[in-house]
Structure formats: structure tokens, C-alpha cells
Image: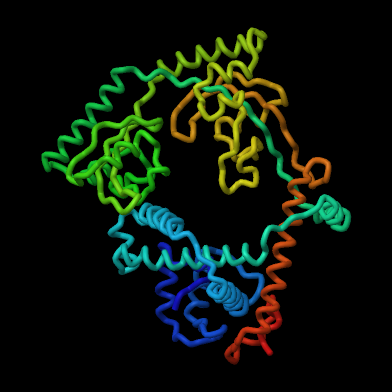
Amino acid sequence: MKRCLMLLLTMTVLNPGIVSGQDSVIDEIVWIVGDEAILRSDVEAYRLFMQNEGMRFDSDPYCFIPEQIAIEKLYLNQAKIDSITVDESQVIRMTDQWTNARITQAGSREKLEEYFNKKLSQIKEERKTIVREQQTVERMKQHIVGDVKLTPSEVRSYFRNIPQDSLPMIPTTVEVQLITFEPRIPFEEIDAIKARLREYTEQVHSGQFEFSTLARMYSEDPGSASRGGDMGLQSKGSLLPEFANVAFNLSDPKRVSNIVETEYGFHIIQLIEKRGDRINCRHILLRPRVSEKELNEASARMDSLYTDIVGDKLTFDEAATYLSYDKDTRNNKGLMVNQDYESQNYGTPKFEMEELPQEAGIVVDKMQVGEISKPFRMLTNKQKEVIAIVKLKARTVSHRANLADDYQALKAVVENRKRDDLLKDWVAKKQKTTYVRISEGWRTCDFQYPGWVR
């Protein structure tokens, strides 16, 4: 039976307690929703997952869990009726990302297969089903809710009627401008890196070592080294252009590419397979080392620039635009943009302090608005050590949301509440037209939706 509860999709990931616990369960049908059954093993598996993760239920898990599964079955059944489909390429992409992450977590493809007692192809097919159902439920919810639009008067009405102590807290955020200098990499260091990569290439071509073995031993890419450099299936658009241009031109899995330079360092690549418009390959990444001498030289250059800025010889904006090495910010006068997909501030210049690079966050935390920091060392998101100076452009201190400063945040709260109300109304109506049978011993619950038992 397919398990479509969203949280269930991670329950068996490297968690032996679940498997052993589930083996002892005598299965039975506990709910029937429409023409689909909910098994006791489904409920037990999720309960054990929550228990092993140290999570707690606010209510009886034997009431909460089957109800959540039942709600999702309502969405999936309606999706069939309404012919709601999902982008299969996105399902494959998400499945590949999940699989690659779990292989890294397990330590190797073989260990993951050993844990699940299944071939990787079987694991991926099961995961694909889960992802497809998860995406279908989300699309069905969007279809039900539609495009929620609010007027300013609705937002103001919500603000007036909610108790002040129930308003959301807006965390402290900052807006930061950045200038970086990258230390010079000596030609000798680059030549040494390339010589090592050429040596690895020769060892593969001569049959002395497998590419995957060398990747595990020497690659400096933390995401793929433990998997023997295996990057998983990737589209051309998901790879850096210079890397993709070489990788997609490979045709012989026994040969190794020429050396490729990217912003992360220097690579050699080996083809695993091509599948449609996607490719799977291995790579070995080596990063040039920056000596203390080069770091000190870069610091001295940044000291001079800092002196010129505070001495009004040029503005911070001008220096960020014309002299900064940071290509992501120099076209925006050095203003950083939040690239954390999970942040509420994604795509804006607002950062909570922990969302900044660690070294920058420590410096910015002690600054006043308009102040320019002295040069400091910083590790970029590409793992490059650079010399940086920052300017604190703005700081908004943590506070209760108010209409004057946080209209968009309050609008988002009201929109989410309206969506939730629409979905609750839909589920309550759907209960009345869907056959539901709950076994004895599973009915005496304080359900979120009381219409299940009738």
C-alpha cells in the first residue's frame, strides 16, 4: 500500500529502530477512506519515527496519525478526479537529490542498499512514488485555494481584531553591503594542483586505480567525495557552465576529462551515464591553498581601501561596484541578497544574524547603522577564504509586528490563515460525501474534524 503521509517519507531513512519495530506489528486495517485502506503498520511506522526522533504528540498518536493519512487520501482522490498532475521531471530531480543525500548519510551506495535490503533502483522507485504523491497533494491544495488576494482593509481588520500579544514577533534583521578581496593564488600552487590531477588521470587510464577510489581519497568536494565523486543525475542548467560544457561532451565512461577550472577550484570528470537531457558523472575537486603570505598581502590591500573609504577619497558604493571581487553583489553596490530558500527573507536584502556568513555575522552584530568595519577574514559559500569589509546599511530590531513597518509580514499571516480556512472547509465538506469506516477501538478520538464518525 502506498504511504502518502508527507512526514512518512523520511521515516525509514537510516533509522533501524523503525524497521525492527515494524516487524513485530500484526497488521490490520484500521481505517477505510473511499476505496483505500489505512493499515496499523502505517500508523506504527510513523509513531516509531516520531519517537526515535525525540518528537512528541500533543494528542493521542493513534488518533492524530490515521486522521492525517485520511486527509491526504481525500486530496489524492480528488486529484485523480480533477486530473491534477505533477511535473515528472521535478519528481525525478527531487528523487535524485534525496537519494544522493541519503547515500552521503549512509557512507556509500552499497551501505544504503544493505540497510534497505534493496537495490538502489528499487529504493529510488519507491521514493519517486512518495515524492509524486507529496507534490500531487500540494498541487491539489493550490487548486482548491486558488489565488488568495487580500485588500489592505482585510489586513487592517485582522490587525485590529487580534490581541497584541498574539501578533507575530519579527526577528532582528540587518541589511549589509560587502566588499571582498581574494588573495592571489601563486602560479606554483596552480601548477601543483594540475599536476596532481594529471597524475590521477594517468592512474585511471592505466588501470592502476578506479576513479571512484581516487575521489574518495582525494576529492575536496564534501558533497560527493564519500560517494566516489558520484554527483547523481543532473541537468545542464543545474551545473556551472564551464563544468557542464565539458561533462556533457564526454562519451566514453572509461576516459577522464581534461582539467576544468570553476569558481570552486579545479576538476577532472568521468562519465557514468547519460539519460535523456540529464547526465550522471563523477568528479574530483582540488582547491588551491592560500598561504599566510597571500592572505596578509590581501589584508594590506584591503587596509588601504578601507583608509580611502573612511577618508572620503571614494564611497563604499563606488568601491563595491568597481573594486570588489564578489560578483554576486558588485552590480548592486555591494548589497547582499538573502539566498536561503528556507528563510522568510529569501530574495530580499534582509538577513537574520545567523543567516549571514559566520565571520560577517560576528562583525555586524557589534556595528552601528552606517558604520564600516575594518578588514576581516571570511569564508564564502564557495569555501574560499577572502578578506572582507562590510557596511551596515540598516538594522530592524526584533519587535511585535505592526502595520507601519510589517505590512507584508502581516499580509502573509492573513493569507496563510485564509488558505487554512479554505482547506478546512473543503475537508469538512468532503467528509460528508466520502465513505469512511473506522475500526472499533479507533473511533473514540477527539479528531480535528469530527465528521469522520457518523
At x 32%, y 48%, the residue is 279
Q: Position of residue 203 (x, y in %)?
A: 15, 37
The image quadrant of residue 21 is bottom left
The image quadrant of residue 26 is bottom left
* Foreground of the two, 111 or 265: 265
Side of 51 relative to 267 (left or right): right
As drawn, which residue projects farthest toward the right? Answer: 160
At x 45%, y 13%, the residue is 297
Looking at the image, is 62 positioned above or below residue 262? below
Q: Position of residue 299 (x, y in %)?
A: 50, 16
Image quarter where the N terminus lies is bottom left
At x 62%, y 70%, the residue is 57
Looking at the image, is 390 positioned above or below residue 38? above
Q: Does residue 69 appear in this view?
A: no
Q: Position of residue 23 (x, y in %)?
A: 40, 79
Looking at the image, is 231 positioned above or below residue 15? above
Image quarter where the C terminus lies is bottom right
Q: Position of residue 11 (x, y in %)?
A: 47, 66
At x 39%, y 33%, the residue is 264
